[in-house]
Amino acid sequence: MAIPVDINGEHFPTKAAATQRCQDVLRSYPGQTGSGPGQPEAVTDEAHVAFLTALIARHPDVDEKADGGIAGFKVQVNPEGTGNTRCFYVLRTDGSEADFSFRSCL
């Protein structure tokens, strides 16, 4: 039986549909050439920021990931990953950052 998922007012009939939405947001930020290691790119679309804020609130370790408050988000290659895998990072108000898996949020 399919389990529906609701994130920031968006209803997804299945976890697969929510996964596709997360991947679509991730692909919206392919990286800026010359921006440094991992080609980081800030998440600038307000709808994406709102979606990611609601998404990370579902993370099992949200207190650790968003410790001190959320200043924004970025997408970049995870240096600990394999290959050229881009992932989401939460930017904290204290200037630190943490990567997070959208799959853990679903």
Image (cartoon, rainbow, N blue to C red):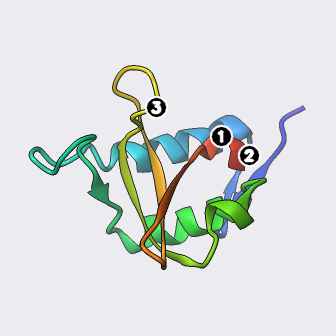
The numbered disc on residue 49 is none
Which residue shows up at 72% across the image and 55% down it?
Answer: 59
x and y percent of residue 100 in the render?
Answer: 57, 49
> Label 2 amino acid?
Pro
Residue that badge 1 annotates: 103
x and y percent of residue 28 in the render?
Answer: 33, 49
Name, please, the residue furthest toward the right: 1
Which residue shows up at 37% across the image and 50% down it?
Answer: 75
Gap between marks 2 and 3 measured at Cα: 32 Å
Circle 1 crowding by C-alpha within 10 Å: few under 14, some 14–19, many from 20? few
Q: Are marks 2 and 3 in contact (CB under 8 Å)?
A: no
Q: Earlier in the sequence, mark 2 or mark 3?
A: 2
Residue that badge 3 annotates: 80
Helix, strand or loop under label 3:
loop
x and y percent of residue 60 in the render?
Answer: 78, 53
Gap between marks 1 and 2 measured at Cα: 16 Å
Gap between marks 3 and 1 measured at Cα: 17 Å
